[in-house]
Image (cartoon, grey):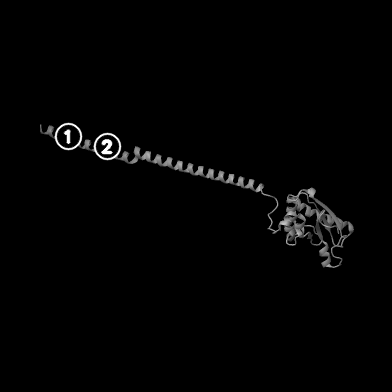
């Protein structure tokens, strides 16, 4: 009988320890799952943050596209405005009197006006218009645009050096360069005639560099206004 009681106590003791161990292992497993698996609230918060970032990036991209489109439209408007600007550059006020404004011939003879200057001078063997005479050519171009009934004759001249044929050709190139400049300003070609006198119409009769410089020129002559020389 004593042996039976001892065996029974041992069995109960072993059963109690096994049950306690199982409970501890189950609790640890639950805690481990709680640590490794995010909750539903955490997942929702992360998803909301992700969607917010995507929405912000899309809004920034949209703003960049709209800004680029705005700049392109502004550039197109500026290009259209530039295309409509007049070809002739604005000139300074020449302070013409009322009589001069009513009489174009008076404007051409007013010593305070760039229109009173009619000669463009060149370097030796050259026909390009130098910068110092550009303003004068522009002034005559604007005058012709404002007075469609006026016509000019551009007379090309050379110094005495060179053959007659060469000087006639060079004088023509000089006259044509002035005509081209005026037509680029918008003056109709029908208002401009050109002729070359070569070395046959010197302004100075000398035979030195000073005289030659005076004779390398183009003269702007207003038909019907300037006296023939």
56 lies left or right of 172: left
- Name the residue at 15% across, 33% down: 8
> Which residue extends farthest front?
99
**86 left or right of 16?**
right
Q: Is residue 44 left or right of residue 21?
A: right
- Residue 123 occupies which quadrant of the picture? bottom right
Between the C-alphas of marks 2 and 1, the distance is: 21 Å
Please give the name of the residue rendered at 32% of the width and 41% of the height, measured from the top-left corner.
35
Image coordinates for residue 204, horizontal then vertical, percent? 85, 65
**Is 10 above or below relative to 67?**
above
Neighbor class of circle 2 (other Cα within 10 Å; few <14, some 14-19, many 20+) is: few
Mark 1 = which residue?
A: 12
Image quadrant where one finds the N terminus: top left
Which of 124/5 is in front? 124
**Who's the residue at 73% across and 57% down the image?**
99
Image mark count: 2
Depth check, front residue: 184 or 55? 184
- Residue 87 got which mark? none
Looking at the image, residue 82 sits to the left or right of residue 133; the answer is left
Vertical placement of residue 7 versus 177, above or below: above
In the drawing, what numbered circle is on residue 26?
Answer: 2
| Secondary structure category for the residue under label 1 | helix
Residue 185: x %, y % from top left: 73, 51
Instruction: Estimate the x, y position of residue 50 in percent, counting from the top left.
Output: 42, 41
Task: Answer yes or no: is residue 37 visible.
Answer: no
Q: Nearer the viewer, mark 2 or mark 1?
A: 2
**99, 48: nearer the viewer:** 99
The x and y percentages for residue 159 are: 85, 62
N-terminal-most mark, 2 or 1: 1
């Amino acid at each position: 009988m004593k042996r039976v009681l001892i065996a029974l106590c041992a069995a109960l003791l072993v059963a109690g320890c096994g049950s306690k161990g199982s409970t501890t292992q189950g609790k640890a497993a639950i805690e481990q799952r709680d640590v490794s698996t995010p909750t539903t609230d955490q997942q929702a918060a992360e998803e909301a943050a992700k969607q917010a970032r995507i929405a912000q990036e899309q809004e920034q991209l949209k703003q960049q596209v709209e800004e680029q489109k705005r700049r392109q439209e502004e550039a197109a408007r500026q290009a259209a405005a530039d295309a409509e600007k007049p070809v002739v550059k604005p000139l300074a006020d020449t302070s013409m009197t009322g009589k001069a404004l009513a009489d174009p011939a008076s404007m051409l003879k007013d010593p305070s006006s760039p229109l009173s200057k009619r000669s463009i001078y060149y370097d030796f063997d050259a026909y390009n218009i130098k910068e110092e005479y550009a303003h004068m050519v522009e002034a005559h171009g604007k005058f012709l645009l404002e007075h469609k009934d006026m016509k000019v004759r551009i007379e090309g001249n050379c110094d005495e050096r060179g053959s007659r044929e060469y000087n006639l050709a060079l004088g023509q190139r000089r006259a044509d360069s002035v005509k081209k400049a005026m037509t680029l300003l918008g003056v109709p070609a029908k208002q401009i005639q050109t002729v070359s006198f070569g070395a046959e119409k010197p302004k100075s009769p000398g035979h030195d560099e000073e005289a030659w410089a005076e004779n390398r020129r183009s003269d702007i002559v207003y038909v019907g206004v300037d006296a023939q020389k």
